Image (cartoon, helix red, strand yellow):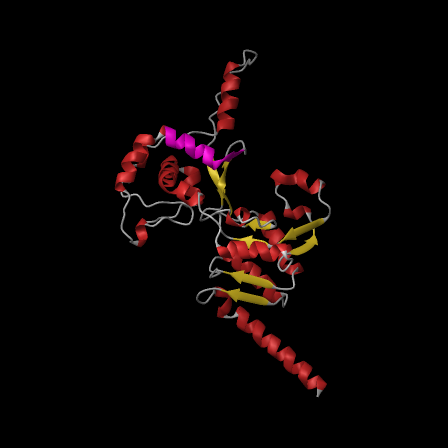
């Protein structure tokens, strides 16, 4: 069945990284070729028309250490239209401009040693080349039934009946590897050093990890500067998104929910806001009388 990748497992255990990349070898390319839905395109059109989105004062708190220089070139304003929990990049594919991907970008990899970024598609091409025999065997064992365990997961994680992941070759960070090779070829090096190339991790928030603080602060800034919050297609069960609904409620910012089934916000927060709104309307009505 499906066991989601946990941050500490990926960071600390090579076998867990082999498991992750093995399942991704089967499922990720299908996931990566997904196209935006009519819902994504509708949000892009609403953004183009100026119906969604907010402009608010910029802050150095909205930038990570990797992007420090960006703040130096800021015009003093930030724009944000969409906050998404998804890592599929479909809002960008639909040409929405001002998007914050709360949980990161599934098509980008980051080295956990040198911090360099890499294209996931190129890395998958290398993975495929190095593990073609394993892939052929794994594809024979992929379940074809409609049970929930055999479905492709939202992050490109595929169920594989054969879990022999120990044979998978996971290449190291190309940047680290190039530097190591250059150091080995440098005749001027007087001290022998052995540097182990780092490993690559998808630039996403795994279970057990935290959303980067600068990303959270930017979303808070956008919510507090807005005149309304529209929540679409989310149960808001995860705290990373729910906190922004709570922030809007605390500021008495109108909240609209568009979802199949109830959400976490409707367990008290939305009702409380509705009650407060009703009291304000009754108060104004009494004053008019």
Q: In which quarter of the image is residue 26?
A: top left
Q: Does the magenta stretch include residue 158?
A: no
In the image shown, does 280 or 12 lie closer to the viewer? 280
Residue occupying the point 42% across, 50% down: 154
Quadrant containing the C terminus in the rendered view:
bottom right
Q: Which residue lies furthest to the top in this view?
A: 187
Magenta segment's dominant SS is helix
Counting the numbered discs, the total is: 0
- Residue 9 visible to the viewer: yes
- Residue 193 visible to the viewer: no
Q: Does the magenta stretch include residue 124?
A: yes
State the image coordinates of residue 219 (x, y, percent, origin top left): 60, 54
Residue occupying the point 66% across, 82% down: 283
- Residue range (magenta): 117-129
Residue occupying the point 31% across, 49% down: 150
In the image shown, does 133 or 20 lie closer to the viewer? 133
State the image coordinates of residue 284 (x, y, percent, origin top left): 68, 81
State the image coordinates of residue 54 (x, y, percent, origin top left): 66, 56
């Amino acid at each position: 069945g499906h066991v989601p990748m946990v941050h500490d497992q990926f960071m600390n255990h090579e076998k867990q990284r082999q498991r992750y990349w093995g399942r991704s070898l089967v499922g990720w390319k299908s996931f990566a070729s997904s196209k935006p839905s009519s819902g994504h395109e509708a949000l892009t059109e609403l953004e183009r028309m100026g119906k969604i989105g907010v402009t608010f004062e910029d802050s150095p708190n909205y930038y990570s250490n990797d992007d420090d220089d960006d703040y130096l070139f800021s015009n003093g304003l930030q724009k944000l239209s969409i906050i998404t929990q998804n890592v599929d990049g479909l809002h960008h594919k639909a040409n929405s401009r001002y998007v914050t991907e709360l949980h990161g970008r599934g098509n980008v990899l980051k080295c956990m040693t040198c911090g360099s970024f890499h294209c996931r598609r190129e890395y998958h091409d290398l993975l495929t080349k190095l593990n073609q025999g394993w892939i052929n065997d794994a594809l024979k064992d992929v379940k074809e039934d409609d049970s929930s365990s055999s479905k492709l997961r939202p992050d490109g994680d595929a169920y594989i009946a054969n879990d022999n992941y120990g044979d998978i070759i996971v290449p190291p960070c190309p940047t680290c590897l190039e530097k190591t090779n250059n150091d080995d070829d440098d005749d001027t090096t007087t001290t022998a050093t052995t540097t182990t190339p780092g490993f690559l991790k998808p630039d996403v928030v795994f279970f057990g990890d935290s959303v980067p603080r600068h990303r959270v602060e930017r979303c808070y800034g956008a919510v507090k500067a807005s005149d309304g919050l529209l929540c679409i297609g989310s149960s808001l069960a995860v705290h990373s998104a729910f906190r922004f609904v709570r922030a809007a409620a605390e500021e008495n910012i109108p909240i609209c929910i568009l979802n199949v089934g109830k959400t976490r916000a409707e367990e008290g927060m939305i009702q409380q806001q509705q009650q407060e709104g009703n009291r304000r309307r009754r108060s104004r009505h009494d004053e008019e009388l």
